[in-house]
Amino acid sequence: VWKGEPIYFLIDFMKRTMLLSEWSFTRGEKRFLIPSLLKANVNDVTVQGLQCVFDFKPSFLPIGVFERLICLCVAASRRRQSAYKRRLRKPVLFQGFATIELQPISLVTII
């Protein structure tokens, strides 16, 4: 339908509703993260450094809250990279799981 071209009004709408976040952890063309499209494939992930874990498994979250939280954390990590003189680690993301470095050696894990 859109012949491979980005649809800017849709991208803007998804950013504003926190359903999409810019992905600046790879070089090259502009990329976006859409958490609701992540694959359900969590491998054994080892994390070093300070870690904060938010575990939503035993409780109920309305649809979309988890995905919005991931978008907010990825956006915060992307913004903070410029404050630090190095690139932060690329987030580890799967459906229902995320580990994101918010500042050097400080990670947040959301499950």
Image (cartoon, helix red, strand yellow):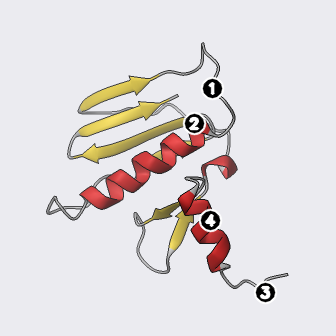
Q: Are marks 3 and 2 in contact (CB under 8 Å)?
A: no
Query: Viewer-proximal residue, 16 or 96?
Result: 16
- In the rendered structure, which amino acid carries the disc numbered 2? Phe
Residue 101 percent coordinates (x, y): 32, 45
- Asked if residue 91 shows in the view, the reply is no
* Mark 1 or 2, nearer chain start: 1
Q: Is residue 59 toward the left or the right of residue 22 in the image?
A: right
List the residue tagged with mark 3.
3
Q: Is residue 58 toward the left or the right of residue 80 in the image?
A: right
Residue at the image position 34 percent from the left and 59 percent from the top: 78
The secondary element bearing badge 3 is classed as: loop
Residue 63 percent coordinates (x, y): 69, 35
- In the rendered structure, which amino acid carries the disc numbered 1? Leu
Q: Are marks 1 and 2 in contact (CB under 8 Å)?
A: yes
Query: Based on the displayed image, in which of its 4 quarters is residue 32 positioned?
Result: bottom right
Quote the CA–CA distance across marks 3 and 1. 36 Å
3 vs 2, front mark: 2
Quote the CA–CA distance across marks 1 and 4. 22 Å
- In the rendered structure, which amino acid carries the disc numbered 4? Phe
3 vs 1, front mark: 1
48 over 38 or under it: above or below: above
* Mark 2 or 4, nearer chain start: 4
The image's mark for residue 13 is 4
50 over 22 or under it: above or below: above
List the residue tagged with mark 1.
61
Query: Based on the displayed image, in which of its 4 quarters is residue 83 positioned?
Result: bottom left
Residue 35 percent coordinates (x, y): 60, 49
